[in-house]
Image (cartoon, helix red, strand yellow):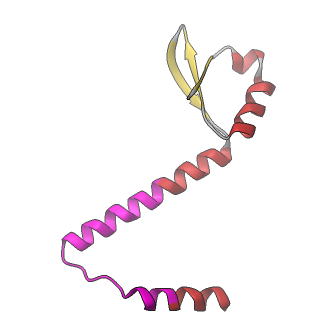
Amino acid sequence: MPKIRPISDLRNNFTQLSKSLHEENEPIFLTRNGVGDIVVMSISYYEKLLAKYEVYQKLDAAETEIKDGALGKDYKSVIRKAKAKINA
């Protein structure tokens, strides 16, 4: 369930708001006059969100390539190369 707080909490309860953002690792939705205005999140949450977005973009691009006739790579050769990079 999303956390919704008044925007005045930025001024009046910033320390508590920051602590909550880091402990719960979820964004907080701030309202102005009872209407949604902005979303605040920790940097770590933002980085996770950005990483997920990048993965989804890459998956979308891969699906488009497959639809356009591109050939995939053999699973075993991909794993072999990945292990070689890890062990190098």
Report x, y in % for residue 2: 56, 28
Q: Main secondary structure of the magenta part?
A: helix
Task: Look at the picture and state if 7 lies above or below 1.
Answer: above
Q: Nearer the viewer, residue 7 or 66?
A: 66
Quadrant location, the C terminus = bottom right
Highlighted range, magenta: 53-79
Q: Nearer the viewer, residue 76 or 62?
A: 76
Residue at x-position 29% and y-position 67%: 63
Image coords of residue 8 (percent x, y): 68, 13
Examine the structure image and report whether residue 43 is included in the region drawn in magenta: no
Which residue appears farthest toward the left when viewing the image? Answer: 68
* Residue 85, percent from left and from top: 60, 88
Q: Residue at x 54, y 85 (%)?
A: 82
Q: From the viewer's perspective, is residue 80 above or below residue 65?
A: below
Farthest residue, direction right: 15
Instruction: Write down the quadrant of residue 43 in the picture.
Output: top right
Q: Is residue 59 magenta?
A: yes
Instruction: Please state if 16 lies on the left or on the right of 70 as rendered.
Output: right
Relative to 65, is 17 on the left or the right?
right
Give me the residue at 53% from left, 9% from top: 34
Q: How many marks?
A: 0
Above or below, 78 against 48 in this view is below
Q: Quadrant of the N terminus?
A: top right
